[in-house]
């Protein structure tokens, strides 16, 4: 008989009112998830105060120090202590205001939540005051207050984040990872507010600096680099109450994750399944499966048609006119993409010399060996018949018909080759005749710093070349013939979102194989298809790609006879 564990009988516990300190820490846990949460709240306060310059400094991934300085309106001396009380805010004053939120913050929970889990110092001066005010707080209490000299604006320093909440502290990642989250966050604000000058310094190194000139393309250049900014296409939809402004990347500038899709609703950076669906619909048929565009789009909606009060961190929202928003965004992006030429099918060229590093696979006879006894039995001998839709190889075997996904099959071949080279410590490297300059986004730079040694072990050779720029001098041979800069960015993205239970060397090998493999839509000559099939026959696990997808579909002779009515 199955037994079940009895749940805790909560009715046996007496109902009590929680202590004020415990309440404040519970509330802080909803608002302050990690150091980037602190940066978010302080930057939004600065922007709501009308700042035109915001300087962010962090140390130790934001745990040791977060400092945000701005030139906004400042806090009047008479209101300084009040700013740190829960639900104290200058951004709303009545129930009606909740229906028309025009500021980034409005709940009055940010500062008291931060003070509940860290030590805080504040320097602020309002234009109406003759001097500034200094305040030092810890555990939610004011420890010191005195006048100070400061120009108009606010500087707030947070030290020892989660020092008073060690249960949360142990769940944080490495400093590099936390800095990456902060860099990505500040990059989003730079794209949302191109008229504001942002600077981010992490552990003494400049991660981002924007001009604040008000040009969105300038902001994209400073976040993603000049190559991306130059290729982006203008989006403009000016009819009706709902408007869309921004820049979108051509289909050829695809990425391996949705991280480069940025939407701002009334300048608020948001996660919206509706806007993502509209984007994917606009790009339908233009991107390969599993690939995503670069989008920086501002959606302007009347304040009373959007509800931002649905999530503690205000990262999600609801539209009252969802269908209208969807159609407007989808049509605006599609119209912009109509200005870009669509690429034609690619034709792959292959070198015949095994010594040539441009070779993606070699045409060779399958030879069973003692070290690979399964080479002749893992798959039957197949005879290539042709190519279907520039994506599938049609082959005949003694057991019937095979449809082979050329990308998945080549992924398997390249993946096993890379792992064999890595385990034998003899990675094949393709030196570049001319070094490639790679401009990384702030988060990509943090990932590169964290993963530098691992990337070098697999054949990426690069060196610093200015702020967030690197010279790429060599790439893994598996990526020969590809755009080395795009491949490096894609590998960084793949590693950042790879499953933590997969060994890092396998994650890198999977990413390299994916980006180095022949693509769907590429025309292959008969000898090239034959060479790929022969190498797949020698693979250890030929029937699946490294991601677990099937490499082939098999229609047995019996199935074919049955479909054609040749058997009863």
Image (tube, rainbow, N blue to C red):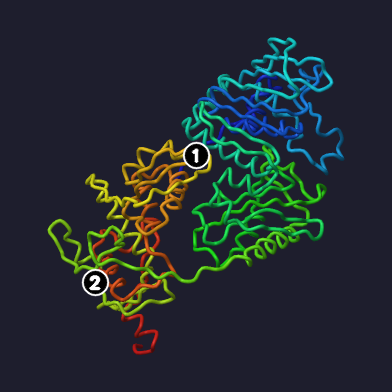
> At 70% from the left edge and 20% from the top edge, which residue is drawn?
20
Looking at the image, tell me whether mark 2 or mark 1 is earlier in sequence order.
Answer: 2
Image spot of residue 530 (x, y percent): 28, 72
Residue 122, placed above or below residue 299: above
Which image quadrant: the N terminus? top left
Residue 449, placed above or below residue 428: above
Look at the numbered disc 2 and give the secondary structure of its residue.
loop
Write down the residue under mark 1. 468
Residue 12, placed above or below residue 221: above
Classed neighbour count for the residue bearing mark 1: other residues with Cα under 10 Å, few (<14), some (14–19), many (≥20): many
Look at the image and tell me whether residue 498 can be seen: no
Image spot of residue 287 (x, y percent): 53, 63
Res. 373 mark? none
Look at the numbered disc 1 and give the secondary structure of its residue.
loop
Q: CA distance from mark 2 to mark 1?
A: 50 Å
Residue 144, placed above or below residue 219: above
Res. 380 mark? 2
Asked whether 169 or 278 is in front, the reply is 278
């Amino acid at each position: 008989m199955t037994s079940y564990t009895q749940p805790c009988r909560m009715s046996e516990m007496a109902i009590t009112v929680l202590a004020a300190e415990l309440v404040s820490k519970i509330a802080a846990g909803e608002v302050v998830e990690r150091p980037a949460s602190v940066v978010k709240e302080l930057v939004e306060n600065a922007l709501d105060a009308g700042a035109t310059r915001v300087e962010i400094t962090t140390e130790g991934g934001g745990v040791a120090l977060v400092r945000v300085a701005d030139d906004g309106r400042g806090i009047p001396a008479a209101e300084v202590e009040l700013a740190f009380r829960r639900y104290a805010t200058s951004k709303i004053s009545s129930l009606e205001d909740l229906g028309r939120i025009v500021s980034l913050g409005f709940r009055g929970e940010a500062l008291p939540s931060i003070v509940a889990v860290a030590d805080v110092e504040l320097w602020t001066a309002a234009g109406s005051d003759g001097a500034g005010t200094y305040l030092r707080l810890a555990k939610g209490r004011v420890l010191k207050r005195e006048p100070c000299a400061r120009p108009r604006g606010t500087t707030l320093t947070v030290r020892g984040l989660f020092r008073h909440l060690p249960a949360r502290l142990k769940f944080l990642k490495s400093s590099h990872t936390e800095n990456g989250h902060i860099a990505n966050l500040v990059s989003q604000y730079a794209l949302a507010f191109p008229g504001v000058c942002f600077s981010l310094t992490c552990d003494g190194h400049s991660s981002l600096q924007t001009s604040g000139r008000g040009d969105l393309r300038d902001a994209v250049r400073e976040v993603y680099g000049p190559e991306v900014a130059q290729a982006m296409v203008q989006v403009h939809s000016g009819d009706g109450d709902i408007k869309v402004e921004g820049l979108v990347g051509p289909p050829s500038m695809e990425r391996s994750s949705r991280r480069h899709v940025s939407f701002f609703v009334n300048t608020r950076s948001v996660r919206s399944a509706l806007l993502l669906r509209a984007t994917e619909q606009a790009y339908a048929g233009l991107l390969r499966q599993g690939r995503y565009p670069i989008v920086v789009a501002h959606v302007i909606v009347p304040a009373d048609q959007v509800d931002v009060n649905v999530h503690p961190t205000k990262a999600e929202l609801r539209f009252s006119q969802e269908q209208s928003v969807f159609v407007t965004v989808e049509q605006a992006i599609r119209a912009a993409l109509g200005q870009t030429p669509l690429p034609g099918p690619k034709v792959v060229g292959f070198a015949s010399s095994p010594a040539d590093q441009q070779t993606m696979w070699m045409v060779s006879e399958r030879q069973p060996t003692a070290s690979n006894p399964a080479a002749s039995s893992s798959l039957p001998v197949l005879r290539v018949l042709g190519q279907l839709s520039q994506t599938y190889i049609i082959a005949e075997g003694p057991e019937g018909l095979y449809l082979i996904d050329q990308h998945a099959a080549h992924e398997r071949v390249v993946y096993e080759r890379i792992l064999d080279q890595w385990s034998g410590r003899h990675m094949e490297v393709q030196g570049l005749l001319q070094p490639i300059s790679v401009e990384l986004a702030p988060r990509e730079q943090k990932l590169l710093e964290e993963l530098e040694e691992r990337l070098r072990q697999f054949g990426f050779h690069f060196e610093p070349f200015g702020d967030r720029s690197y010279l790429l001098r060599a790439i893994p041979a598996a990526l020969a013939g590809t755009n080395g800069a795009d491949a490096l960015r894609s590998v960084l993205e793949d590693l950042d979102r790879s499953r933590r239970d997969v060994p890092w060397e396998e994650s890198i090998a999977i990413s390299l194989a994916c980006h180095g493999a022949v693509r769907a839509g590429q025309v292959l000559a008969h000898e090239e298809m034959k060479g790929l099939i022969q190498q797949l026959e020698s693979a250890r696990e030929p029937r699946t790609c490294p991601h677990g997808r099937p490499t082939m579909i098999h229609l047995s002779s019996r199935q074919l006879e049955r479909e054609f009515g040749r058997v009863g």
